[in-house]
Every structure is written in C-alpha cells, then in structure tokens.
Amino acid sequence: MNKTQKGLWGALLLGVVVLLLAAMAPGAWATPNQNPLRQTLPSGDVNATDPTGVIKNLFQVGESVHVRVKNGSFTPGSQVDVYVVVDDLCTIGKAITADVSGGMETLIANANGAFDGPPFPQVWAPPLVPGNYDVVFDANRDGLFNDTDGVDDAVLGTGFVVQAPPPPVPVGGIAILPNRFELLAPWVGLAALIGVVAVAAVVRLRKQA
C-alpha cells in the first residue's frame, strides 16, 4: 500500500470517527431552536419525592407524588408551574405536554428559591396510573420548555415510574362455613333409628318370654 492509499484510508477513518462523535453528541442534529435538553437546571436540583422529601424513582399506584428543589433553583417569591407528563424528550421551545395528574400545580418559591416542606408540595394524588413520567418545572409559566426550566432526574431519562399492581391471586372457590347441625343431622337420625330398633327388639323378647 503506497503513501497515497494510506492517506486516503486515514482520512476515511477520521471521517467515520467524526461522524460517530457527532451522532452521539447532544444536539448534533438539532436546529438552533430545538436543542435536545432534558433539563437546564443542574442534575439533581429538582426531583420527585415522597411527602418527607426523600427522592423516589418508583411509586405504587396508591402513593402520592411530591416535589422538592435545591435552594436557589428559582427566584425567591416567584410562581412556578409544575406539570406531571408522560416521559418525553424536553427540547428548548417545545410546548410542555399535557399534565396527567388532573392539572398542573402552581407553586411559590420560598425565600431560598425552593419549596417549603416537609410535607413537600403534592403534584399528583392517588390513584396513580402505571407508566413512565417526568415532572417539568415551568419557571416563566409560558407553557414552553425554556432554559430557565427543569425536569426531574433528567440524566436518567425517566423522572419516575409508577409500578403496575400485581395481578390478583386466583381463588379456587368461595369458602362457606359449615352448619354444624346439618353435619350432625344424619348421625342423629341414624342413632334414633338404632334406638327404635333396639327398643322394638327388647319389647318383642319380653312378649316371647
């Protein structure tokens, strides 16, 4: 292989590497107004939690979903619209999808730029619906995902999961408590019949004596 061929193969290999890196890079194929972005706040600053503020990624249908954010996440005293949406890729300029919890909640950031708790604000009351979801925090309340907004656990790809309840255990039949008198009735009848036969036999023997 001469130097020209080696150079061509080297250039081709370099081109393949560049294309692979570009394909894996966030926003490589997005327009300037549609940069793929799951959250703009630092990862872990906004989360779905239980009432006490413990971060949860897995909920049961009978539990409630609450939220907490790190101090300084929002402007103190500002209102923040919080949506629970089906797990989706949030992009700059994209409308926030429909809330599944019965309507978005409007929360007010405290003096620390967070939310008061515990108990922390509830954004979805039971019963929950099984599936994968995100909590979206719309800081400027325009219904669009912007660079001031956030999504819970964005790095993991899914904010939280609601687990389907286990199927009911099949029951073979209906348990009916037995009636003790009904159980004893045949034996009482048999005992009475034996008694009648015995008395009749004694009477007959006496007559023959």
Image (cartoon, grey):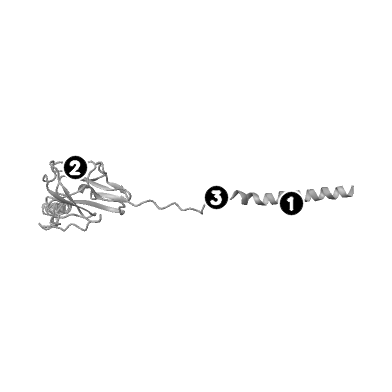
- Along the viewing direction, whichever of 25 and 43 lies nearer the viewer: 43
Disc 1 + disc 2, Cβ < 8 Å: no
Q: Amino acid at mark 2?
A: Asp
Q: Amino acid at mark 3?
A: Leu
Label 1 to label 2: alpha-carbon separation: 83 Å
Q: Which residue is mark 3?
A: 177
Q: Amino acid at mark 1?
A: Leu
Residue that appears at 23% across and 51% down = 134
Q: Which residue is mark 1?
A: 193
Marks 3 and 1, the one that precedes in the sequence: 3
Q: Is residue 1 visible?
A: no
Q: Residues within 10 Å of mark 1 (few under 14, many from 20)?
A: few
Marks 2 and 3, the one that precedes in the sequence: 2
Q: Which mark is residue 132?
A: none
- Along the viewing direction, whichever of 188 and 160 lies nearer the viewer: 188
Q: What secondary structure is found at the residue carrying circle 2?
A: loop
Q: Quadrant of residue 113?
A: top left
